[in-house]
Amino acid sequence: MDYGYQLLRHAVQQVFGNIRPAARLTLALFLTPVILFLLLTGGTGFASVASAEAVGGGLVLALLVTVVVAVLAYCWAAVGWHRYVLLEEIGPGVFPQWRPGEVMAYLGRAIIVILVVIAGGIAAGIAVGLVVGITQSEGIAIFMGIGLVFGLTWLATRIGLVLPAAALGTRMTIGESWRATAPVSGQILLPLIVIAAVFGLIGQVVLMIFGQTVPVESFGVVQDQVVLSLPGNLVNAVLSWLQILINLALMTTLYGNLIEGRQLN
């Protein structure tokens, strides 16, 4: 059976086969920044951008507070999820056990991964820009833009085994993760493409159902923009939680299989 398909199936089963403990360990932490942001913006979310006064004051503060809370909450949730899958650690309450050492290590590794991806994106973006500039083709621009996004996601996954390693309190370098994933580097693309495509389509359906049109002023020009209503924002947050959880499960599966020698079911 194709390794990419096995990887995708195992990651999906990992999430939906353990959906209750997954929700118990991570859902509240994932939703906390979203709910906080909606409360700080009066329930309008990013629709507040339509107000110049909001942009100048309240929205900026709301964004800063939300980002700080989100970073800590997401790292805490991710560590708890990795440890549940690999160690069956559940904890006594509705949140995973607070492990400051592992959470801070996870945050540090995540920053390194992001910086490497940004560097790769800049280099690849220059190359894409040159090709698009030479060809002057909108079709090629769209194709290469999509390819760039998937390429950077693939890069993040290749070096992302440092994240479950950090959650377990184990040190792994970017180079070690890159070498460990080398034998299956091509097969990793299948689950990445399928996950992005499925959740992208679902997201469009959510926008069609819960979208609302608001006037947005940009550079002195008022244009109508479709944004999500409050219920739509909450639905979108749950979908984002599931997508992130499956992507984390993908890295956890790769770590368990390639580093710990576990078999894929």
Image (tube, helix red, strand yellow):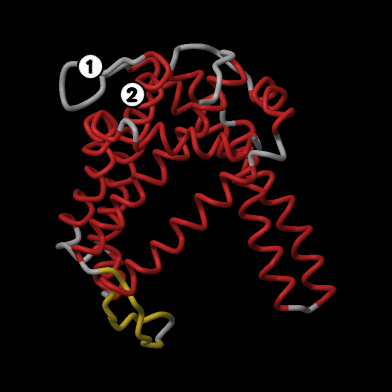
Give, as a three-letter code, the residue at label 1. Answer: Gly
Amino acid on which disc 2 is placed: Gly
Residue lying at 47% horizontally and 56% vertically, measured from the top left: 198
Residue 261, quarter of the rendered image: top right
In the current view of this chain or complex, which residue is farthest to the right?
134
Which residue in the structure is indicated by mark 1? 91
Please, is residue 84 above or below residue 115 in the view?
A: above
Which image quadrant for residue 117? top right
Q: Crowding at label 2, few (<14), some or many (≥20) Cα neighbours within 10 Å?
A: many
> Is 98 placed left or right of 1 in the picture?
left
Q: Position of residue 133 (x, y in %)?
A: 79, 73
The reply to whether callout 1 and callout 2 are in contact (CB within 8 Å) is yes
Q: Which residue is found at the position 25% from the left and 62% from the top?
A: 45
Q: Quadrant of residue 48?
A: bottom left
Q: Earlier in the sequence, mark 1 or mark 2?
A: 2
Specify whether 22 is left or right of 162. left
Which label belongs to residue 21? none
What's the mark number on residue 80?
Answer: 2
Tell me: 245 left or right of 73. Answer: right
Disc 1 on helix, strand or loop? Answer: loop
Seen from the viewer's position, the closer of residues 212 and 129 is 212
